[in-house]
Image (cartoon, rainbow, N blue to C red):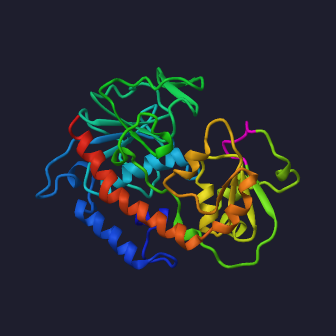
Amino acid sequence: MDVRDLWGWSSRRTGVNPRVARQIARLRGLFGHRTASAAARATRAGQPKTIPYVVWAPPYDPSTGGPKVMHWFVNELNRLGYEAYAAWIPRSVRVNPLWDEPTDYPDDFIAVYPDTQYGNPLGAARVARWALNVPGRLPMIAQHGRGILPLPLGSDWGDEPTDLIFPFARGYNVWGLPEERILYVPIQEVDDYEDRGLPRSGRMFYVGKGADTPRIPETEGLPELDKETTHDRKRLAGTLNRIELLYTYDTQTGITDIARLCGCPVVLIPNDHTTREDVYGAESGADGLGWGVEETEKAIATVDARAIRAHIEQLMRDFYEIKLPCFIRLTQQL
């Protein structure tokens, strides 16, 4: 199964521009499509051997963005002709059985850690850090023997000056790094979500990581978009095609993009972690979004599912043409 079937980039399914699918497949071909096993696949004729990557990946959960993107990254590096492995505490890690995620990694490698991992538990001589959020904003863990030790919010990353940092998004780039260092990749399964042109009525709200944000009167009495719905793509797409507006207390969630792909405008409820500038400057754009209830009409007036889909497709091309080559070049120089 092609990873694009899982994240929505397969040309075999309806709703995807075939030209875009062919272009993405061609871009993969430039790096070399992998079909054999880990180290052997990485040593094709004509390609210099690169230092392997060991990606620190929490147990795979298809409904959780952070672990999902780390496991996807292992698979995609392998598919492009590099050598990559998944690791966690203990050494055995739950992976996606449909993806290429070996776990028996070699002694010499480049470690890739997310923002939720403190320090360098792999003891790697070369370290890259992929900030899927601002370090310390989400719960962080440290290694404790063969287990994990939760750290309080606001903890530092335990990074060293020699570590290479790659923010996932502009809003997490607290280091002021150049645009090419922002390793953003869309994580929406775009084939599963489209505007079906159905009649719409009613509004809902979503909480997600916004449990601490005070509730507003506009969501009182409204149905909540719960986990049972968000974990079921078909059900989620159907729901977002029937309602006229979604309020979200989580201002950093892929649900906002999924809703807009379904033609449903979204109003984000402001909190202390995100600013209007963060939202309007984000990679996925601000069409169909409102920052606070004051911008409800703006969100409704600007939602355009086709334009949002085209924008996400461009972001995927940027990942393969610009962002990933920068990551490979800089990390191989560590």
As for residue 210 lying within the magenta part, the answer is yes
Q: Quadrant of residue 270?
A: top right
- Tag count in the figure? 0
The residue closer to the viewer here, 121 or 295, is 295
Instruction: Residue at the far left: name it.
Output: 46
Residue 139: x and y, percent?
Answer: 58, 31
As for residue 195 lying within the magenta part, the answer is no
**In this rendering, position of residue 300 left or right of residue 156:** right
Classify the position of the N terminus by image quarter. Answer: bottom left
Please determine whether, in this image, residue 148 is positioned above or below residue 218.
above
Q: Residue at x 44, y 48 (%)?
A: 71
**In this rendering, position of residue 192 left or right of residue 265:** left
Residue 330: x and y, percent?
Answer: 25, 41
Q: Residue at x 33, y 69 (%)?
A: 25
The part of the chain drawn in magenta is 207-213
The residue closer to the viewer here, 322 or 237, is 322
Is most of the magenta stretch helix, strand or loop? loop
Residue 60 seen anywhere in this rendered image of the structure: no
Q: Residue at x 53, y 70 (%)?
A: 307
Instruction: Residue at the far right: name it.
Output: 221
Residue 240 seen anywhere in this rendered image of the structure: yes
Please determine whether, in this image, residue 78 is positioned above or below residue 199.
above
Residue 173: x and y, percent?
Answer: 45, 39
Residue 189: x and y, percent?
Answer: 53, 63
Classify the position of the C terminus by image quarter. Answer: top left
